[in-house]
Image: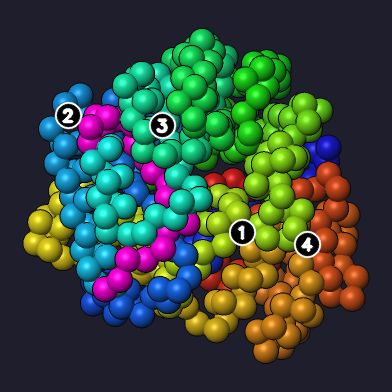
Amino acid sequence: MRSDLAQSYGQDRLPRYTSYPTAPHFSPAIGEEDYRRWLKSVPVQHPTSIYLHVPFCRSMCWYCGCHTSVTKRDDPIVTYVAGLRTEAHLVAETIGQRMPISHVHFGGGTPTIMSPEAFVDLVGALRYSFFVLTDAEIAVEIDPRTLTEPMTEALGYCGVNRASLGVQSFDPAVQRAINRLQSFEQTATSVERLRRVGVRRINFDLLYGLPLQTVDSCLDTVARCVELRPDRFSVFGYAHIPSFKKHQRKIAEDSLPDSVERHLQSETIAEALLDAGYVRIGLDHFALPGDSLAIARQDGRLRRNFQGYTDDCADTLIGLGASAIGRMPQGFVQNVVPTRDYLTRIAENRLATAKGYVFTEEDRFRADIIERIMCDLAVDLPRVSQLHGRDLRSAIVDRPRIESLIADGAVTMIDDRLSISDGAEFLVRSVASAFDAHLVHSAATHSRAV
């Protein structure tokens, strides 16, 4: 555990590198007609992935950084889900063929906020518009506080085979400070119900750096979670950006741990999960050795996308819903963020594209380097440079940063093959940023490195 490194680099504001270039660089110059043209050229012989965004919750967690809103009524949700079905049809119609689909991910918000009947209809619409492969992974993000038994049964009926449950922390003081009261019993009941209907791949999401959180409370949360033996953990640092998410102003800044404490919490959680038999995956994921993510890491097939680390090898990701981001061979596209604007466009039989980004050869080169650093904690710069026909000497953008990391023992560089040292894995974003030609340090845009 290198607290000296946390002090030196922990305050930097850096991207999470779930994409490259990152979303702040998307431009409204890329619009609906570009997306239509890209969809028509999608290689139909290769499997594609689908992400559906459901931007509704029953209550607001004050730490939340997602595009979501609170609704107590069901009418807005019914209208929105109808829009998702229509958008799926519009996209499939534009492609012109039923694309094979290898991964489907429902994110939010709270996707299970819709009625069981609406979820069944939506999955049916996807299967009608696309060819969802028999072995496709169908994943849903779940709030255990609101998951009902009928909804659980609908998930099983629709073939959902992976569920990601938000836990964050079981410390009652922390839960009160973030406006998310969730008991261990609620979580355990949800896991038991999901496994009973055939949803056997279970992920837990944890946060560190929350208000009033301590190392001891992190350890207690991990111990309770391990009792339920989920297949994967995602362990993220809380990103406090109240200028961007106004509800975060309800969190008192003096209740937040500093970078050194955040680092201690992060490493304590990691050590506890490793002791419990989980394998570390990149920066912030952990998986049981037999999980597909751990196998992909071992085989060198690990990838990174907007959901984090993944074994999804599809080069095309279709984003459905307000604010959803898609990735095409040509670049990124993102739908309009306001739900009302999204529904208006879909009602007019228009694609909801608001902005995007066209890849350059330079971007593809740097994206490859950054993905390998984020996934493998190492990169063979000569190999990647040769693969892209680029000059090796141009790879590093911020050479003083790399030299500083080498001098501090966080990175080794032998024959231009870079590796992150043991104990410095938490600085992977700092290392990746040295290869980012677009990076603009902005406290309003990015979260702290530690």
**Of marks 3 and 2, which one's residue comes earlier in the chain?**
2
Residue drawn at x 66%, y 17% as measured from the top left: 227
Which label was assigned to residue 332?
none
> Per the image, is 44 magenta?
no
Q: Is residue 144 above or below residue 134?
A: above
> 158 or 58: nearer the eye?
158
Find residue 65 and report its image quarter.
top left
Which is closer to the viewer, label 1 or label 4?
Answer: 1
For the residue labelled by badge 1, is the local secondary structure a helix, a strand or a loop?
Answer: strand
User: Which residue, given by chain and number where applicable, does mark 4 sit on?
Assistant: 378
- Depth-wise, is mark 4 or mark 3 nearer the camera? 3
Q: Please name the residue shown 53% across and 71% down the image.
A: 438
Q: Position of residue 23 (x, y in %)?
A: 43, 61
Q: On the image, which quarter does residue 398 sit in?
A: bottom right
Work out whether 316 lies above or below 204: below
Residue 171 in the image: state x and y as whole percent.
57, 14
Q: Circle 1 is placed at which residue position?
A: 303
**Amino acid at pointer 4:** Ala
Q: Is residue 345 visible in the rendered structure shown here? A: yes
The alpha-carbon separation of the residues under discs 3 and 1 comes to 27 Å
First along the sequence among labels 2 and 4: 2
Q: Amino acid at mark 3?
A: Gly
Q: Residue at x 49, y 30 (%)?
A: 198
Magenta stretch bounds:
96-118
Q: CA distance from mark 4 to mark 3?
A: 39 Å
